[in-house]
Image (tube, helix red, strand yellow):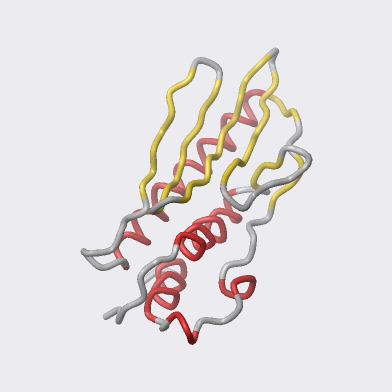
């Protein structure tokens, strides 16, 4: 199993009453204030994050039991934006990059990610924390993981 799969297995396999503090178990993903960057850089960044999201969603779903709600990855097709959402039960996180006037602008929107200024993920390494946080906040089922 990968380190991410082990992390999800620990979350799912630990009875809810024995779980550590949410911030210890599922820290907020590292973000930064959104800023305009070169179009190519923004596109590369979004594609890297989206590709990793697909891998991590698959890994998490491999750990969840057949009866569990699955993480879902949904791509959004928009004229000047690359975007995807990851959902679990009633919660979602949306990662997007908008392209305008030769620049790209990243954005993270979702339950529990409120901020006065627009935020974006610090990079692909922040994605595992985002997905584990989504599982914790949506109330993932706890059961024995083989």
Up/down of 65 relative to 90, above or below: below
Looking at the picture, tell me which residue is in the foreground, 7 or 16. Answer: 16
Quadrant location, the N terminus: bottom left
Camera-nearest residue between 87 and 49: 87
Q: Position of residue 73 (x, y in %)?
A: 39, 43
Does 40 sit left or right of 132 as displayed?
A: right
Front in this rendered view, residue 88 or 81 = 88
Q: Judge left or right: residue 138 versus residue 81.
A: left
85 on left or right of 72: right
Q: Nearer the viewer, residue 107 or 54?
A: 107
Left/right placement of residue 124 relative to residue 78 reads right
Residue 43: x and y in percent read 57, 29
**Is the C terminus in the top left, top right, bottom left or bottom right quadrant?**
bottom left
The residue drawn where x is 65% and y is 31% is 41
Percent position (x, y) of residue 84? Answer: 47, 36
Q: Is residue 16 above or below residue 52?
A: below
Which residue in the rendered view is the most extreme toward the bottom? 18
Percent across and percent down for residue 87 are: 42, 48
Residue at 31% in and 58% down:
69
Please tell me which residue is depicted at 56% across the width and 33% down the height of the picture: 96
């Amino acid at each position: 199993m990968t380190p991410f799969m082990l992390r999800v297995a620990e979350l799912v396999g630990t009875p809810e009453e024995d779980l550590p503090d949410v911030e210890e178990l599922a820290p907020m993903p590292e973000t930064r204030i959104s800023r305009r960057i070169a179009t190519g850089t923004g596109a590369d960044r979004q594609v890297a994050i989206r590709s990793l999201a697909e891998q991590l969603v698959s890994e998490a779903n491999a750990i969840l039991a057949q009866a569990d709600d699955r993480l879902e990855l949904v791509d959004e097709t928009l004229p000047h934006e690359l975007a995807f959402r990851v959902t679990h039960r009633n919660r979602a996180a949306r990662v997007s990059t908008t392209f305008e006037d030769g620049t790209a602008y990243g954005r993270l929107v979702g339950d529990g990610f409120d901020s006065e200024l627009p935020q974006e993920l610090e990079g692909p390494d922040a994605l595992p924390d985002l997905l584990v946080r989504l599982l914790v906040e949506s109330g993932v089922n706890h059961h024995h993981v083989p």
